[in-house]
Amino acid sequence: MRVRGNPRAQVVRIGARLDAGTSAGVRESLHEALDSGDGDLILDLSELEMIDATGLGVLVGAHRRALSVQRRLVLRGVPPRIMRILAVTRLNRVLHVEVPAAAVA
């Protein structure tokens, strides 16, 4: 996982897995990023291949923490398989998922 920052947003790249084995480290990194930066916190999920209930909990927790510090959590590059999981769990209605420009046209 990498964190990049700029004046208007921070970008966090999530690896291939967000599950019970990786969630503690990811959660800690996201909380640090939320507490130390300004603007949107963008999670780049383009490499994410697998997410479980624990990983979904990390996303929801990060979303709530972002709201508490007047920031916005944005999911970018969500693979179709992960998007289906978000839709089935209806988290796509809670979390802000960035829509690619090509999908809008």
Image (cartoon, rainbow, N blue to C red):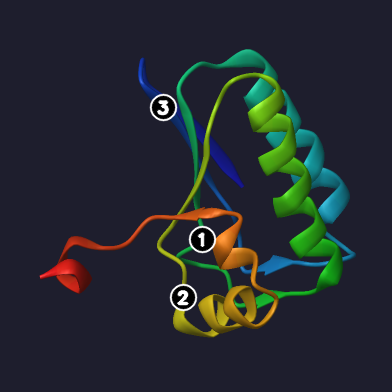
Residue drawn at (56%, 62%) of the image: 93
Identity of the residue drawn at 81% across and 35% down = 28
The answer to which of marks 1 and 3 sits earlier in the sequence is 3
Residue drawn at x 83%, y 55% is 23
Indicate left or right for 52 with 6 as reference: right
Label 2 is placed on what type of residue? Pro
Residue 45: image location, x then y, percent? 51, 61
Q: Secondary structure at mark 2?
A: loop
Q: How many marks?
A: 3
Residue behind mark 3: 9
Q: Is residue 7 above or below residue 81?
A: above
Question: Please, what secondary structure does the residue beneath circle 1 have?
Answer: loop
> Which residue does the numbered mark 2 point to in the structure image?
79
Q: Amino acid at mark 1?
A: Leu
Mark 1–mark 3 Cα distance, whole angstroms, equals 16 Å
Image position, residue 21 (x, y; %): 88, 63
Question: Residue 7 vs residue 85: left or right?
Answer: left
Question: Which numbered disc, 3 or 2, marks the residue that appears first in the sequence?
Answer: 3
Quarter of the image containing the C terminus?
A: bottom left
- Comes first in the chain, label 1 or label 2: 1
What residue do we see at 79% from left, 43% from top? Answer: 27
Tell me the quarter of the picture where residue 31 sits. Answer: top right
What's the amino acid at mark 3? Ala
| Marks 3 and 2, how far apart at CA | 22 Å
Q: Is residue 81 left or right of residue 28?
A: left
**In the image: residue 97, left or right of residue 57:** left
Q: Which residue is mark 1?
A: 45
Look at the numbered discs 1 and 2 and tell me whether their residues touch, using CB distance below 8 Å: yes
Is there CB contact under 8 Å for labels 1 and 3? Answer: no
Image quadrant of residue 5?
A: top left
User: Quick one: SS at disc 3?
Assistant: strand
Assess disc 2: are there few (<14), some (14-19) or many (≥20) residues with their C-alpha within 10 Å of its C-alpha.
Answer: few
